[in-house]
Amino acid sequence: MVAAVRVHKTGGPEVLTLDDIEIPAPGQGQIKIKQHACGVNFIDTYFRIGLYPSPVGLPFVSGNEGAGQITEVGPGVTDLKVGDRVAYVVPLGGYAAERLLPAERAVKLPDNISYEQAASMMLKGMTAQYLLNRTFKVKKGDIILVHAAAGGVGLILCQWANHLGATVIGTVGSKDKAELATKNGAHHTILYRDEDFAARVKEITSAKLCDVVYDGIGNDTFPKSLDCIRPLGMFVSFGSASGPIKAFDINLLQHKGSLFATRPTLNHYAAKREDLVATANDLFNVVGSGVVKIPASHKYALKDAAQAHKDLEGRKTTGSVILVP
C-alpha cells in the first residue's frame, strides 16, 4: 500500500483526501516508478471540480505530472529499464508515492536535471516550448504579451522569449510579482488590477501592439486581449485560470484586425512519441544550459495537497508548485 491523494467527489480543495492504495505490477507496455516529486498544475483543479471529466471515473488519483525512478518494467518495454530516472505528463495518477504509467509517455532525465526540477517543469515547460516554437514561432524583434507572467508557465515564457530576442510584456497582480517577472526576462510589466492593460500595451509599444498574446487566464482577460494584438497577429488561449472563455462571435476577430485565435493543448502537440521526446529534450537543453531557470518555488508534503490547491487558486503562488511524497 502506498500513499496517494484521491478525489472521491468533485468540488473544492477539501475533496482531496490522502488514501492508502495498492499499486499492481506493471502490465503490457507499462512501468512502475517510485516518485520523488509530483507537479501541481492548474489543470489539476479543472479535474477536481469536474470542469474536465475524469477518464477513469471516481475516485481518481489527482495530478498529471511527476518524476521518479523506475522500480519495475512490464512486458514489451524495451527502451527503459529498472533504475532509469524518468519524468512524464500523463492524465491523472500523479499525486502518489508510487504509480504506473505507459512507458511510451515517459522520458529519460539527463543527469543535470533534478527530480524536483522535472516535476516543476514537464507540463509547464513543454507547454512553453510548443507555444513559443510551434503555435507561434517567436523570433527576434517580436513583441509578445504574457498574462500571469509570474505564474508557472509565465516565468518560463518570459525567460525563453527574452532569450529568443522578443520584447516581453507581462501582466501581473502585484508589485512583488512584477519584480519577479522582471527578474525572469520581462521587459515591461503591467499591474492588471490597477491599470487598463490594453491601454498600457498600446502605450508601451507606441501603438504597434503585439505579435502574439499568450493567455492562461481566460474569462477575465477576454476580449480585451484582442485589443493588444496587431492586425494579422495571434491570440493564444492556453488556460482558464479565471474560468473558460465563453462562445463568441467569430466576426470579432475580423473587426479587431483579421486576427488568428487558437486554443492549444500539450496533449495534441506531444501526441506522437517523437514529438514528446523532441519537446522534452528541447526543454532539457535550455534548462541544462541555464537559459531557463526552474526553481521549485513552493513545496508541500503529499498530505498537504489541499492546501497547495487553495494557494494556487488563491493566486498566492508564483512559479512552480510541487508535492514531495
Image (spheres, rainbow, N blue to C red):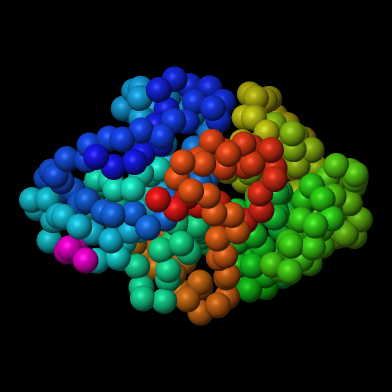
Left or right: 93, with 199 as reference point: left
Which residue occupies 67% across, 63% down?
Answer: 158
- Majority SS type along the magenta span: loop
Q: Is residue 82 magenta?
A: yes
Q: Using the image as rendered, state which of residue 274 and residue 63 is in the foreground.
A: 63
Determine whether 157 is above or below 90 in the image: below
Q: Is residue 207 left or right of residue 135?
A: right
Name which residue lies at 65% across and 25% down.
Answer: 246
Q: Which quarter of the image is occupied by the N terminus? A: top left
The residue furthest top is 9
Q: Is residue 166 visible?
A: no
Q: Quadrant of residue 94?
A: top left
What span is in magenta? 79-83
The percent position of residue 182, horizontal first and vertical second, equals 76, 66
Give coordinates of residue 264: x percent, y percent: 51, 43
| Residue 257 horizontal/vertical position (percent) | 75, 43
Tell me if residue 27 can be seen.
yes
